[in-house]
Amino acid sequence: MSRLVFEDLVLEYEVDEGAVRSVDGVSMELPEGKVTALIGESGSGKTTLSNAVLRLLAPNARVRRGRILFDGVDVLGLGPEEVRRFRWHRASLVFQAAQSAFNPTLTLGEQLRDAVADHGQDPQRPPFPERIQELLAMVRLDPARVLPAWPHQLSGGMRQRVAIAMALVLHPQLLILDEPTTALDLITQSYVQDILQQVHLKTGVTMLFITHDLAAVARLADFVGVMYGGRLVEFAPAESVLRHPRHPYSRALLASVPRVDGKGGTRARGALRAPDLLNPSPGCNFAPGCPRVMKRCEQERPALEDGVACFRPEGEP
């Protein structure tokens, strides 16, 4: 297990209109051996933050400030060959859509073996043939069927499980999951979530789970980080965030989720107003629509203290 720490990370995308600040001063430490979920609306910076760990950013992305430490080493300072060794050996990623994660001209067995060979190991020598078989069995797939198959011959859920197995083949200490069940039907989503839960129990790997699915968060996560407009506004144990959210945005986000009894699904004013990422607010970027706003909120940015970045969190007068 390894420790991942974000230190005051500021990351921007250069566009014609200026610099879009996608990640704005995020500081966070992932608990070792636990599942940490990042939640927030689209555009809040979740995927950019996770992709930065593996240096998988678009060419127009620029790190303006901060560090990403993995076992005390800043991954942003690694050279090309060091980055290549870091990926999949130390940290790996399961992409959002398994449909586009595989080469359609190679069998899945070839691609699993290539993942090993590309990192300087012989996939034909122990322990890798056994490791591949073991991982496919762990994600509840039949190696005899999957290894000779082409990607199009498997369902979306099966391909996503192969992607999970591939991400684990070199024993990484960190597994990043970027919306791993979004493109799947509800039954398959639940099945894959159950597999992820079992994988975590068996391997103890630290997981960073990017998702919009709050039911999956409740099922899988030990800790939850809430992002809004590129900023981390709340970070606490999952049960605390889901049951008693302290930041007004967290409360609005959770209230927006429809319930099976037909209640919920309402959205607070602030959640309807996207922050201006081209001109970040010097204060709290949720202030324009926050029901608990004070004058100080518009002028001063709150630091993340005691798990919440708010001058007047929920539960306090």
Image: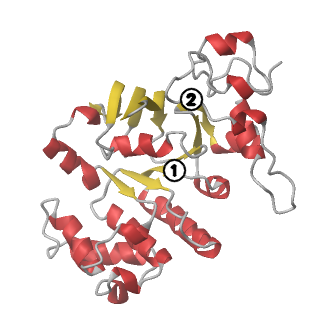
**Is 311 on the left or on the right of 161, as rendered?**
right
Give the quarter of the figure containing the C terminus. Answer: top right
Q: Position of residue 69 (x, y in %)?
A: 33, 33
**Is 90 on the left or on the right of 97, as rendered?**
left
Task: State the SS at label 1.
Answer: strand
Q: Give the quarter of the image for residue 71.
A: top left
The one nearer the camera, 293 or 317, is 293
Q: Give the quarter of the image for residue 106.
A: bottom left
- Residue at the spot 42% in from the left edge and 75% down from the top edge: 159
Q: Is residue 98 above or below residue 69?
A: below
- Residue at the spot 16% in from the left edge and 62% down from the top edge: 118
Residue furthest front as drawn: 16
Can you see residue 224? yes
Mark 1 residue crowding within 10 angstroms, few (<14) / some (14–19) / many (20+): many
Task: Identify the amino acid type marked 1.
Answer: Ile
Q: Which mark is residue 276?
A: 2
Q: Nearer the viewer, mark 1 or mark 2?
A: 2
**Is 297 on the left or on the right of 56, as rendered?**
right
Q: How is the image coloured?
A: secondary structure
Task: State the SS at label 2.
Answer: loop
- In this figure, which residue is indicated by the disc labeled 1? 210
Q: Position of residue 24 (x, y in %)?
A: 48, 27
- Residue at the spot 50% in from the left edge and 43% down from the top edge: 46
The one nearer the camera, 271 or 83, is 271
